[in-house]
Amino acid sequence: MTAQLIDGKAIAAKFKADIRDQVESMVARGLRRPGLAVIMVGDNPASAVYVRNKRKACAESGLVSVAHDLPYSTTQAELVQLIESLNRDPAIDGILVQLPLPQHIEQSLIIEKIDPAKDVDGFHPFNVGRLALRVPLIRPCTPYGVTKLIDHVGISPKGRHCVVIGASNIVGRPMALELLLMGGTVTVCHRFTGDLAPYVRDADILIVAVGRPGIIQGDWVKPGSLVIDVGMNRAPDGKLVGDVDFEGASRRAAWITPVPGGVGPMTVAMLMKNTLESALTRLGA
Ligand code: GUN
C-alpha cells in the first residue's frame, strides 16, 4: 500500500480564499477589516519564521496585521500593559502572543491577560474549558486544523481508536479534546508512556506532536490508518522533517500528511478563521 498524501497547503489555500471573500464582503458593507495583533518577544529563529507566515497569511486573507516585535529584555509588566491596551483597542479582534516567551515571563499569566474574546490562539483557560465542556468557542488553531484535515479525508473518528502522541498545551491536550468531541476513543501518550509501539500499532488515527524526528517508526503504523504528523524539525541537512518516519509509514498508512505542507498551513488558516469570526462577532455582523 502507498498512502495518499493529504495536501494541507491546498486545503489551507481554500480556507484562506473563502476568508478573503468574506472579508471583502465585510468591506463592501462598510465594515472594517478584521485586525490581528501579533506579538513576538525576543528573536527565537523558529518563532520568527512562524510569525512571518502568520503576517503573510493576514495579507493574503485581507486581514490587517499589527506587528509588535519586542526585545528579549521586555518585562512581564510591559507585556501585560501592551495586552491590556490591545484588549481595549476597538480595531483589534485577535491578540496572538507567539510562544515560547523568554524565561523571565510567566507564560500562563500572559495568556490569562488576553481577553478570551480576542484569544484567537484558543489558549485562554476559558476557551480550553469551553472545548473540554463540549461547547467550543475559539478553538486552538493546530488541533482545529487537524479536525479539518480529518473531515477532508472523510473518515469519522467515531468508534475509532485515535492515538495522540504528545501532551502539550498547544497541540496534544486540545487535540485529544477535539477527537473526543468527534466521538473518537482517545489515548494520549507522553514522555512517561514508555514503549510507544503498541499504541501506534493499534491507532486507526495517529496524531504525532512531539518535536523529535523519527520518533515514530514506519513499521509500527497500522495498515490502512490515517497518520497526521504535526512535528516540524530541522534535519542536519537543513530540510524540514516531521516526527514520523515518512517513507516507512507511507507504505502502511492509507493517508498521511507531508512535512512541510501538511498541518503547518492549516494552523495558519485556522488563525485567520478565528480572527475573522472574532471580528464578525464584535461587529455584530
Ligand atoms: N508556538 C508554537 N506554536 C504556536 C501557536 O500555535 N501559537 C502561538 N502563539 N505560539 C506558538
Image (cartoon, grey):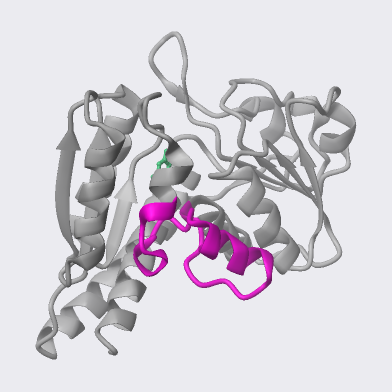
Residue 117 included in the magenta stretch of the image: yes
Image check: 183 left or right of 245?
right
**Ligand 1 picture quarter:** top left
Seen as rendered, the residue at the extreme top is 236
Indicate the quadrant containing the C terminus: top left, top right, bottom left or bottom right: bottom left
- The residue nearer to you, when weighing 113 against 141, is 113
Closer to the camera in the image, 146 or 73 = 73
Place of residue 195 in the rendered image (x, y in percent of width and height, measured from the top left): 86, 23
What residue sits 32% from the left and 62% below the top? 272
Residue 152 % position (x, y): 57, 64
Badge count: 0
Q: Residue at x 86, y 36 (%)?
A: 199
Q: Which residues are magenta?
A: 112-141
Residue at 72% x, 34% y is: 251
* Image spot of residue 282 (x, y percent): 29, 80
**The residue positioned farthest toward the front in the image shown:** 77
Q: Eyeballing the image, is 279 above or below 48? A: below
Residue nearer the viewer, 203 or 165: 165
Examine the rendering and report whether any part of residue 264 can be seen. no
Query: Is 239 included in the stretch rendered in magenta?
Result: no
Quadrant for residue 151, please give it: bottom right
* Residue that appears at 19% across and 58% down: 85
Quarter holding residue 39: top left
